[in-house]
Image (cartoon, grey):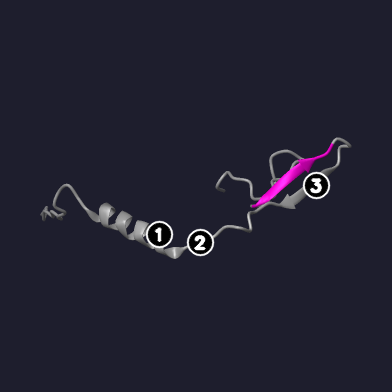
Amino acid sequence: MFKSIPAPYTPYKEIRKLKPGEILIYQADKKILTKKHYHQNISFSPLPFRKFFFETVKTTMKSDVKVACIARLVED
């Protein structure tokens, strides 16, 4: 229908997609492992994001022209 292939499938019979956050490890003895890969030491402070978010929204809402709607009634 949408011409896409859902995960974990691919067009190839013996190949599968990795899940989000996974890595594939191929070892010399032809052993294949998949592991979750993510960083646990990520610190997140909402204050810098909040400032950045509101500045971006304010900038995006500015317009170089006046916003208007022009409608014309057409009678047959």
- As shown in the figure, which amino acid type bears the numbered disc 1? Pro
Q: Which residues are magenta?
A: 21-27
- Tell me the residue that label 2 is attached to: 44
Q: Amino acid at mark 2?
A: Phe
Query: Callout 1: few (<14), some (14-19), or many (20+) C-alpha neighbours within 10 Å?
Result: few
Q: For the residues marked 2 and 3, what is the alpha-carbon distance in whole angstroms?
A: 31 Å
- Mark before the other along the chain sequence, 2 or 3: 3
Dot 1 falls on a residue whose secondary structure is helix
Q: Which residue is mark 1?
A: 48
Res 33 label:
3
**x then y, percent, for residue 27:** 83, 39
Residue 57 located left or right of residue 7: left
In the displayed structure, 39 sits above or below 26; it is: below
Q: Residue at x 77, y 42 (%)?
A: 25
- In percent of the image, x 54 and y 60: which residue is there? 43
Magenta-colored stretch includes residue 9: no
